[in-house]
Amino acid sequence: MPINLVRLALILLTVQGCTSVTIDEYHASQDVGITHGERVVVLGRRHSSDYETEPDLVSCIGDVLDDQNDVIEVIPERQFIDALYPWFEPRTAPMRVKDMNRLLSREDIAKTINSYNIRYIIWVDGKTETTSSSGSIGCSIGAGGAGCFGFGTWDKESDYEASVWDYQELENIGQISADASGTSYMPAIVVPIPIIAQVQKNACKAMGLQLRNFLNPQAAVVN
Amino acid sequence: MNLVTKVVLLALLSTLWGCTNNLHVKGDLPTPLISPIPQSMGVFYDDEFRNYVYTEQSEDRGKWIIDNGDAQVQLFEQVIPKLFKRVEVITSLPTAELPATTDLVIHPKVTDFQYSVPRETRFKIFEVWIKYNLTVYDAQGRLVADWIATAYGKTPTAFMQSNEEAMNAAIIVALRDLGANLSIGALRVPEIKAWLDKRPAQPSSSATPANQQARAEG
């Protein structure tokens, strides 16, 4: 009987809440491609006053883009913005692609960006937030032992948009948006069992995969 | 006082100390990619600036003790030498009798430090605002500019991140913001700009690095 309970607990611990993800893609240009040696940088927008695009989300999208292909090489966000400090900080970062012309009028900035052989700059803007929560869990401890009882649930929503700038042509070539939502549950019968919906992680995966298709690495391999 | 009372008091004090958020700000600050202004600058860090510690006084807020002195000196030491052709750290402000060996002298002071934590707002971000008063003198100690520079930083909460780590990250972002403000804003301060324009025998071609910087700033 205790073995069955342990099995049940292990199964419940590996169960995840469901997440639904909706992806929208807009192509401003059909001329999209990347060749060996060209690189991509994924940057987070941080200018809003009430939220901040999470650095781990930006890094996760970079990892998905970089993964399972030998064409797209991603420069880590921190490495890029540190090398170009202070020109990609929240107060100074170019908001529109034509603002890049202003930055590139400085030889040292142009030289540093060119040293990375950047083809695309991808700006990610958005956030994941808990939209509602309900239920309660109470825990107590006594001479006979400790335990928790109750039930909690919460909803999370992610809303991200990625703008893809072609650095070589200095144009915005498209946008991809990812909206994800999911509900997590936490029943507690002696032990709390979290059934977590990986909303941000799923938004990241969906956005990363879509961006990878958008940049069309398969066609570039043929070239 | 017997031994048991002492142990209980010690345990109580350690519990209370555990409720205080003690933070010595640490972090990597990058070197700015800027062209130097062709003047020399002396920097005077007074003890208050070098050893700046913010202590939360409000009874209604969590107890925070934030030691930001080393980090803000580190930021100035990263940025100012890139902003001016030659930089010296000086130990007193210049006077007519004892002038500085540099063209200008800057004396930074912290005039305000504010923060918010997620418990106080509905947003899951730590925010920090720091206001600096940067007083600029000429070599004879005459006031050139009284520049108010603000720094703002925020960081989202993250899983398994302590309050101290999140606050540290927000302060480092604020210091980066101050560095950006110093690097780009120095030439925009009217009094500094007017003083620089009056300086004779400086390269004045439109291709000087400082002019390039002004163009990039828009």
Image: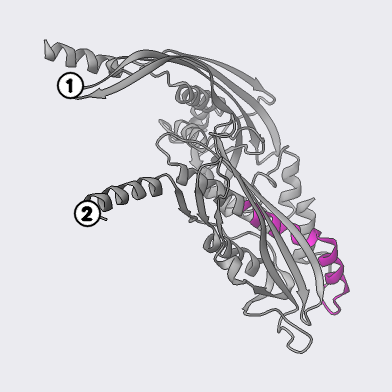
In the picture of the structure, the residue carrying the numbered disc 2 is B3
Segment tinted magenta in the rendering = B176-203
Q: As drawn, is A93 to the left or to the right of B60?
A: right
Q: Secondary structure at mark 2?
A: helix
Quadrant assignment, res B154:
top right
Residue at the far bottom in the pictured view: B97
Q: Residue at x 84, y 79 (%)?
A: B201
Instruction: State how far apart marks 1 and 2 are (Cα).
Output: 31 Å
Q: Residue at x 55, y 62 (%)?
A: B69
Label 1, residues with CA under 10 Å away: few <14, some 14-19, many ≥20: few
B200 or B182: which is nearer to us? B182
A49 or A175: which is nearer to us? A49
- Residue B76, position in %: x, y? 61, 64
Marks 1, 2: nearer the viewer: 2
- Residue A140, position in %: x, y? 29, 22
B155 or A70: which is nearer to us? B155
Residue kind at label 2, given as amino acid type: Leu
Marks 1 and 2 in Cβ contact (< 8 Å): no
Chain of the residue displaying label 1: A
Residue kind at label 1, given as amino acid type: Gly
Chain of the residue displaying label 2: B
- Residue A25, position in %: x, y? 61, 19
Q: Main secondary structure of the magenta part?
A: helix
Q: Residue at x 54, y 32 (%)?
A: B124
Q: Is residue A116 visible?
A: no
Q: Is the residue B38 above or below the residue B66 in the image?
A: below
Q: Secondary structure at mark 1?
A: loop
Q: Is residue B187 magenta?
A: yes
In the picture of the structure, the residue carrying the numbered disc 1 is A144
